[in-house]
Image: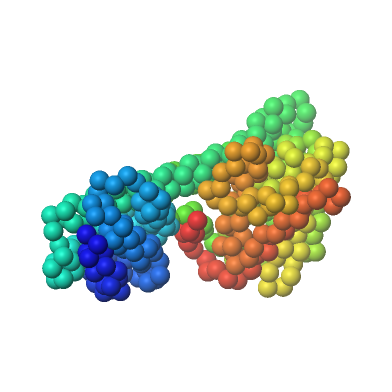
């Protein structure tokens, strides 16, 4: 068994090259994949198998040690990485391991070191490695779906709350103008909720390497933000300030996504900000780009958590507040980056919390585009 391990170690480059060639022939989703991403954990996986074979005369009966555990941890990472690769499936992950087993077996046969015991050991490694990869892949896809559904469900509450408030204020005795205004707000909010429900259905069917669908068009972003400002004054009891440098900021944006971005930030500012302090919405026209910011006073987000707060699948059992913030902030980051920009967070006890989003006006073309998570 020791000699077999040595032969594997000597042929790592050949094994990887042969495997890569066959994978690209047999797995469609791998053809345009970057070589580093495609090879992923393979070199470590081969080396670990070689080390185990070299160390034990009969490895399959040896008690699992740290090297065994490391092998299967690498395979779990492989499954997670494949979940981020476009259009990958469980079947393709399984086929990757079948091809690897085939290539490795051929190399061992050519070097006259393949035996029944070696075959049994490789079968053991491949079965467990495949199981770990598929398990991690499926869990990652499930986590993505749950996060997207949770974020959308969270966002649907805002327009429905506005519609509910408008209907509650609807009183025919208050005059035709007020009735007409409340009716308009309620219809607009319900219509927006229906649009978000369509996005919810899209999120449920998300596959490997896919994210949310955005639809870009030439719009005046000021009008959207002004509407959100007025809606926020209607539904919340907080004081709001709206500052802007221009009321005509035209560019190629996804208006629905930007609305959700701002409403998420306002909702969090209301939830975590000081009730008697104003929430400030600010929009600046920077020529080729636009800068949005939402500011509130209140309990700051801890410095050590500020980098984690935008992470899509980040879980933090020690902080319910961090998870609550992070639900919509994932979307904020995705939307900002989809517009060629970024989101910046400043938060401390003295200056309060400010989220600043920069978006470029013309980086996208009109039409639909799916944004990776």
Left or right of residue 196: residue 50: left
Left or right of residue 351: residue 116: left
The answer to which image quadrant residue 287 occupies is bottom right
Left or right of residue 121: residue 143: right
Number of numbered discs present? 0
The answer to which image quadrant residue 39 occupies is bottom left
- Residue 265 at what x, y percent from top left? 69, 48
* Point 62% across, 60% down: residue: 336
- Residue 323 at what x, y percent from top left? 62, 41
* Point 73% across, 26% down: residue: 171
Q: Return the residue nearer the eye: 207 or 119.
A: 119
Whether residue 238 can be seen here: yes
* Point 41% across, 45% down: residue: 139
- Residue 98 at what x, y percent from top left? 22, 57
- Residue 48 at what x, y percent from top left? 34, 60
Left or right of residue 58: residue 346: right
* Point 62% across, 46% down: residue: 326
298 in relation to 81, above or below? above
Q: Return the residue nearer the eye: 287 or 44.
A: 44
323 in relation to 80, above or below? above
Whether residue 187 can be seen here: no
Q: Return the residue nearer the eye: 258 or 220.
A: 258
**Looking at the figure, which quarter contains the N terminus?**
bottom left
């Amino acid at each position: 068994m020791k000699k077999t391990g040595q032969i594997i170690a000597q042929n790592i480059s050949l094994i990887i090259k042969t495997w890569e060639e066959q994978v690209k022939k047999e797995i469609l989703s791998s053809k345009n994949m970057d070589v580093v991403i495609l090879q992923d954990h393979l070199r470590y996986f081969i080396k670990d198998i070689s080390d185990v074979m070299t160390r034990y005369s009969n490895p399959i009966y040896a008690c699992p040690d740290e090297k065994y555990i490391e092998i299967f941890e690498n395979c779990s990472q492989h499954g997670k990485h494949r979940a981020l690769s476009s259009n990958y499936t469980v079947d393709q992950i399984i086929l990757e391991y079948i091809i690897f087993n085939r290539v490795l077996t051929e190399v061992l046969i050519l070097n006259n070191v393949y035996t029944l015991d070696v075959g049994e050991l490789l079968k053991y490694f491949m079965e467990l490695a495949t199981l770990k990869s598929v398990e991690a892949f499926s869990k990652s896809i499930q986590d993505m779906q749950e996060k997207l559904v949770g974020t959308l469900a969270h966002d649907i509450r805002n327009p429905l709350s506005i519609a509910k408030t408008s209907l509650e204020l609807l009183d025919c005795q208050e005059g035709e103008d007020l009735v007409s205004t409340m009716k308009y707000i309620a219809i607009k909010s319900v219509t927006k909720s229906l649009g978000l429900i369509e996005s919810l259905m899209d999120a449920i069917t998300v596959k490997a390497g896919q994210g949310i669908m955005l639809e870009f068009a030439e719009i005046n972003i000021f009008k959207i933000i002004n509407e959100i400002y007025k809606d926020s004054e209607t539904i919340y009891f907080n004081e709001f300030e709206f500052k802007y440098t221009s009321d005509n900021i035209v560019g190629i944006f996804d208006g629905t996504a930007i609305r959700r971005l701002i409403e998420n930030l306002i909702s969090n500012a209301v939830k975590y900000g000081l009730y008697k302090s104003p929430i400030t919405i600010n929009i600046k026209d920077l020529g080729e780009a636009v800068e949005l910011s939402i500011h509130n006073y209140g309990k700051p987000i801890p410095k050590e958590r500020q980098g984690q707060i935008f992470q899509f699948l980040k879980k933090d059992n020690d902080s319910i507040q961090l998870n609550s913030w992070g639900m919509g902030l994932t979307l904020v980051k995705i939307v900002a980056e989809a517009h060629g920009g970024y989101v910046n967070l400043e938060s401390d006890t003295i200056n309060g919390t400010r989220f600043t989003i920069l978006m470029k006006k013309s980086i996208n073309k009109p039409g639909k585009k799916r944004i990776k998570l």
